[in-house]
Amino acid sequence: MILGAQMSASGGVWKAFARAEEAGCDTVMVYTKSNRQWKSKPIPEKDVNKFRETAATYTGNVDPMVVHAAYLINVASDKPEVVAKSAVALRDEIERAELLGIERLVFHPGSHMGAGEEAGLAKVAAALKQVIADTPGYQVRVCLETMAGQGTNLGHRFEHLGYLLTEIDAPERMGVCFDTCHVFTAGYDIRTPAAYSETMAQFDEIVGLDQIKCFHFNDSKFDLGTRKDRHQHIGRGFLGEQAFANFVNDPRWQHHPAHLETPKTEKDDDGNETEMDAVNLATLRRLIV
Ligand SMILES: [Zn+2]
C-alpha cells in the first residue's frame, strides 16, 4: 500500500509535500481551505503553478495526493439554506481539486438532522448528481467516506454507500474512502483475519470493493459498534495491530493510498514531544510481511 498522512497546507498547499516527506509519507492528504469556514479565497494562479511544479518534483516520492472536503458541508441537511450553501461549497472543493490536478476528494455524506436516513440520503444523491452534471469532463472523483454513525450522520451502513453510488450512477466520478476506525465503530469487525474477510465480503456484496479508491488508517478509542468517531494511534486502540496487518497485506490494496488522521504529537511525562506520524507509519510498515 501507499502509506501517508493528512498534512497541514498552511502557507500554501504545495508546502504539504515537504511536510509529508519529512514525516516519512509516500502519499499525502490535505484540506485546500479552512475546514471550518464556508467561504475561502480562490487559489491564485501563481499558487496553482507553484503547486503543480512542486507536485512534479515529488512524483514517485510523495504521491498520489488526496483532498479532504471541509467538515461544514452538509448536503443532507433538513434546512434548505444549508443544503444550498453546501452545494456551492462542494462545487468549490471540486473546482479547487481539479485546478490542482488532484483526483480524489474525500467527502462526508452528511447528517440528516432528524429528517430520517431515507430523506437525507435522497438529498445527498441529488446534490452529487447535480454537481457531477455541472462539472462534465472533470477528473476529480468524489470519494464517499465510511462514517462512524455519530448523531444523525449518514454513511455508517454499507447500504447507504451502495444506495448512493447506484443512485448517482457515475462510476468514473465517484468512489469510497474506507476509514478503519469509522467502519469498526459503525459495527463491522475487522480485527481478525476471519472478521476482516467477512466484512470485506459484505462490503463487496453491498457496495463493491472496486469502489474503494483510498483509505483512512486510524485506530479507535472506542469499541465495536459504539458509533463514536475518536481516532487513536495505530495498534493502541480497540482495533489493534492485526486489523491493520489485514489491510496492508491484502494484495487488492497494493496500489491504494492510505492516510493517517491520528494525533500528530504525543507528550511524555517530562513534556517531551514525539512526532507521531513517523511512529504510526513505522508501525504500519512493520506489519507488512
Ligand atoms: Zn473524513
Image (tube, rainbow, N blue to C red):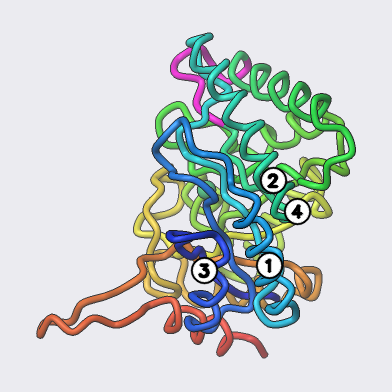
The residue singled out by tag 2 in the image is 143
Range of the magenta residues? Answer: 110-118
- Quick one: label 3, few (<14), some, or many (20+) residues within 10 Å? some
Q: Position of residue 95 (x, y in %)?
A: 69, 39
For the residues bearing labels 1 and 2, Cβ distance under 8 angstroms: no
| Residue type indicated by callout 3 | Lys
The residue singled out by tag 3 in the image is 15
Name the side, left or right, on which 109 lies relative to 224. Answer: right
Q: Is residue 3 magenta?
A: no
The response on whether ligand 1 sits within 8 Å of label 1 is: no
Distance between mark 2 and mark 4 Cα atoms? 10 Å
Distance between mark 3 and mark 2 Cα atoms? 24 Å
| Residue type indicated by callout 1 | Pro
Q: Nearer the viewer, residue 43 or 162?
A: 43
Q: Position of residue 120 (x, y in %)?
A: 59, 19
Distance between mark 1 and mark 4 Cα atoms? 12 Å
Res. 103 mark: 4
Name the side, left or right, on which 188 lies relative to 82. Answer: right
Query: Mark 2 falls on what kind of element?
Result: strand
Q: Residue at x 63, y 17 (%)?
A: 118
Q: Nearer the viewer, residue 77 or 203?
A: 77
| Image quadrant where one finds the N terminus | bottom right
Closer to us: mark 3 or mark 1?
3
Please tell me whether residue 272 is drawn above or below residue 199 in the rendered image.
Answer: below
Q: Quadrant of residue 126?
A: top right
**Which label's residue is closer to the chain start, 3 or 2?**
3
**Which label's residue is closer to the chain start, 1 or 4?**
4
Q: Residue at x 13, y 80 (%)?
A: 271
| Residue type indicated by callout 4 | Glu
